[in-house]
């Protein structure tokens, strides 16, 4: 998230015109330009629908979100803006041609969650996970899991702090069933602990 704090404007008493206030304005402009550049890059790669996670009520302020499930989505890009997402699990079921754009996003698993996966794809096809950091908070059993999901691309992702001594079979990336023709590019998995 940005360090930008909006300037409070009031009639009759303008804020001081100083370096700190000008730097705040410049940071806001830079953050907006970065977000526009990411969205333009995404738009150039697709003819499908682009959905901002914020429009779905998924917050990037570090507060707990409920488990989120997407079913039968097709030709869609889900864009998660820069920020920290505290999650109980995000699941995609029976989806096709879906991209999860998570550059500059950090996902932290809610240690009180019952779920086993931070991000799971079940019976999907042609899935891309592009960027982001996934911190299992020593509670998630798996970082990103694919079940019967062929044609997967995971790139520029960091997965960390998965599992604990009480979790059997912990893994950063998990491929089960038909997950043929998958590619992994520039992925780092560290801190996996299994009981």
Image (cartoon, helix red, strand yellow):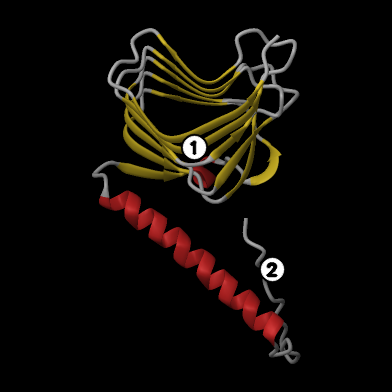
Mark 2 and mark 1: Cα distance apart in space: 29 Å
Q: Nearer the viewer, residue 194 or 142?
A: 194
Asked if residue 194 lies left or right of residue 105, the reply is right
Q: Where is residue 128 in the image (x, y as percent from the top left)?
A: 37, 33
User: Measuring 34% from the left and 57% from the top, which residue is drawn there?
Assistant: 40
Quarter of the rendering containing residue 166: top right
Q: How crowded is the residue under tag 1: few (<14 C-alpha within 10 Å), some, or many (20+)?
A: some
Q: Is 73 rendered above or below residue 10?
A: above
- How many labels sit on residues? 2
Q: Nearer the viewer, residue 84 or 137?
A: 137
User: Measuring 52% from the left and 72% from the top, which residue is drawn there?
Assistant: 29
Quarter of the rendering containing residue 6: bottom right
Q: Do the residues labelled 2 and 1 touch (CB within 8 Å)?
A: no
Q: Is 16 rendered above or below residue 165?
A: below
**Quick one: quadrant of the C terminus?**
top right
Residue labelled with disc 1: 157
Q: Where is residue 27 in the image (x, y as percent from the top left)?
A: 58, 71
Q: Which residue is outermost to the left? A: 47
State which tag comes first along the sequence, 2 or 1: 2
**Quick one: quadrant of the N terminus?**
bottom right
Q: Position of residue 52 (x, y in %)?
A: 46, 46
Q: Is 146 rendered above or below residue 3?
A: above
Q: What element carries label 1?
A: strand
Q: What element carries label 2?
A: loop
Q: Where is residue 163 in the image (x, y as percent from the top left)?
A: 67, 19
Q: How crowded is the residue under tag 2: few (<14 C-alpha within 10 Å), some, or many (20+)?
A: few
User: Measuring 33% from the left and 10% from the top, which residue is drawn there?
Assistant: 178
Please identify, in this view, whether the residue under mark 2 or under mark 1 is nearer the observer: 1
Q: Nearer the viewer, residue 3 or 75?
A: 3
Residue labelled with disc 2: 5
Mark identifier at residue 92: none
């Amino acid at each position: 998230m940005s360090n930008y704090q909006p300037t409070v404007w009031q009639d009759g008493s303008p804020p001081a015109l100083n370096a700190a206030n000008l730097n705040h304005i410049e940071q806001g402009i830079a953050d907006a330009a970065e977000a526009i550049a990411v969205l333009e890059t995404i738009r150039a790669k697709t003819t499908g629908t682009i959905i901002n996670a914020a429009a779905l009520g998924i917050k990037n302020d570090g507060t707990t979100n409920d488990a989120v499930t997407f079913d039968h989505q097709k030709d869609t890009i889900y864009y998660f803006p820069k920020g920290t997402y505290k999650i109980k699990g995000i699941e995609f079921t029976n989806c096709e041609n879906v991209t999860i754009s998570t550059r500059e996003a950090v996902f932290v698993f809610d240690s009180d969650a019952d779920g086993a996966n931070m991000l799971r794809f079940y019976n999907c096809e042609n899935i891309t996970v592009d960027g982001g950091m996934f911190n299992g908070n020593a509670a998630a059993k798996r970082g990103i899991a694919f079940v019967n999901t062929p044609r997967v691309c995971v790139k520029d992702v960091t997965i960390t702090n998965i599992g604990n001594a009480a979790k059997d079979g912990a893994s950063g990336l998990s491929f089960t069933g038909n997950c043929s023709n998958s590619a992994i590019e520039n992925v780092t998995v560290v801190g996996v602990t299994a009981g």
